[in-house]
Image (tube, rainbow, N blue to C red):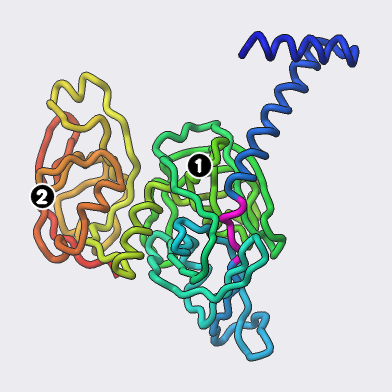
């Protein structure tokens, strides 16, 4: 393959009389363009434009002729049955959901489930012959990796922007006040209307759900990781909501050196570093401290935030659980009684 690329560059050099360095840069840009084009063409047929009507009281907003606020966002189809993953804030409080499919069809959407705590929601349309995409593995992302955002900013349907992963493991506060953990930061340009659209890698795998921008900053945009999206979407489709135990902590995943793993005989290679404890929360009423690293719950290993969320299901609400921690050089167990996340 490399010999072929070298010959291609030499042909560019011979034919166009450019320098070898310029010829190399031309081919490199072509490869980047092809990667972005390929990913966009693979995913775009499953990206939808969501238009909603919301009842808003006490605010000056743009209204439809029937006196309701008009809003819009993005989403993407994740199954042939017509399930669509989008942001909670796109559809929250809606009285009507309209879904525009890239092939020109317009469908009425039904809200299947909504989880404001992760800013994710599932909508369903009832039609056939749908293009759909699968959620990829966001855990394999690396800082600096090229990513592509697809959506409908300001109503400009199926717009594509590209950038890189700026950081991983960010926390972002949701509309409920809960911290959304394991958030991806990117500089792929997002604008109002991109919310709910997919963030994809160059292989066309969905690695995130675009959710937020920071104004007036430029190049600071966020997406909920696809690993979170997989779990939340499955619960919303099955039950219509996500009931979960609430600890009241914010944190990020940290990897352990081999010596720590061997010394403590850990079953995990990473844990959750507690960076923040919410006042008056179950964690605040326990002996948990900032700086503790969670490695297990009730005997189950915990290596990342998604695993902890899965274990904090409805069976843990108002029941005492035992968190296994690393505190400095000690391995300890702390009892906590999670409340229900509202």
The magenta stretch is: 44-49
Q: Is residue 48 inside the magenta stretch?
A: yes
Residue 128, image x, y percentages:
52, 65
The kind of secondary structure element at disc 1 is: loop
Q: Which mark is residue 267?
A: none
Please state if 101 lies on the left or on the right of 261 as rendered.
Answer: right
State whether residue 291 is above or below residue 340: above
Determine the residue positioned at 55% across, 83% down: 56
Label 2 environment density (alpha carbons within 10 Å; few <14, some 14–19, many ≥20): some
Residue under pointer 2: 322
State whether residue 169 is above or below residue 65: above
Residue under pointer 1: 205
Which of the pair 136/125 is nearer the observer? 125
Determine the residue positioned at 34% across, 58% down: 234
Q: Quadrant of the N terminus?
A: top right
Q: Quadrant of residue 300?
A: top left
Residue 135, image x, y percentages:
44, 48
Residue 40, image x, y percentages:
63, 45
Determine the residue positioned at 10% across, 39% down: 332
Residue 67, image x, y percentages:
63, 90
């Amino acid at each position: 393959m490399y010999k072929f690329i070298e010959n291609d560059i030499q042909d560019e050099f011979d034919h166009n009389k450019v320098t070898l360095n310029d010829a190399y840069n031309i081919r490199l840009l072509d490869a980047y363009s092809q990667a972005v084009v390929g990913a966009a063409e693979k995913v775009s047929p499953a990206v939808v434009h969501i238009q909603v009507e919301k009842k808003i009281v006490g605010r000056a907003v743009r209204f439809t002729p029937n006196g309701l606020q008009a809003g819009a966002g993005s989403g993407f189809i994740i199954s042939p049955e017509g399930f669509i993953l989008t942001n909670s804030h796109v559809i929250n409080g809606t009285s009507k959901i309209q879904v525009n499919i890239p092939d020109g069809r317009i469908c009425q959407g039904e809200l299947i489930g909504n989880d404001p705590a992760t800013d994710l929601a599932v909508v369903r349309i009832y039609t056939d012959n749908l293009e759909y995409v699968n959620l990829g593995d966001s855990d394999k992302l690396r800082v600096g990796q090229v990513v592509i955002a697809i959506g409908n900013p300001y109503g400009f349907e199926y717009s594509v922007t590209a950038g890189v992963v700026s950081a991983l493991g960010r926390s972002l506060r949701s509309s409920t006040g809960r911290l959304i953990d394991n958030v991806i930061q990117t500089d792929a340009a997002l604008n109002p209307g991109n919310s709910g659209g997919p963030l994809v890698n160059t292989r066309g795998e969905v690695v995130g759900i675009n959710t937020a921008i920071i104004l007036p900053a430029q190049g600071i945009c966020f997406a909920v990781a696809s690993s979170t999206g997989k779990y939340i979407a499955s619960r919303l489709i099955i039950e219509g909501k996500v009931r979960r135990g609430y600890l009241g902590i914010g944190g990020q995943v940290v990897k352990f050196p081999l010596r720590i793993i061997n010394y403590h005989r850990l079953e995990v290679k990473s844990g959750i570093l507690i960076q923040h404890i919410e006042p008056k929360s179950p964690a605040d009423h326990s002996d948990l401290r900032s700086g503790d690293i969670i490695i297990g719950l009730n005997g189950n290993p915990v290596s990342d935030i998604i695993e902890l969320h899965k274990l904090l299901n409805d069976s843990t609400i108002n029941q005492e659980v035992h968190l296994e921690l690393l505190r400095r050089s000690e391995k300890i167990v702390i009892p906590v009684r999670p409340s229900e996340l509202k």
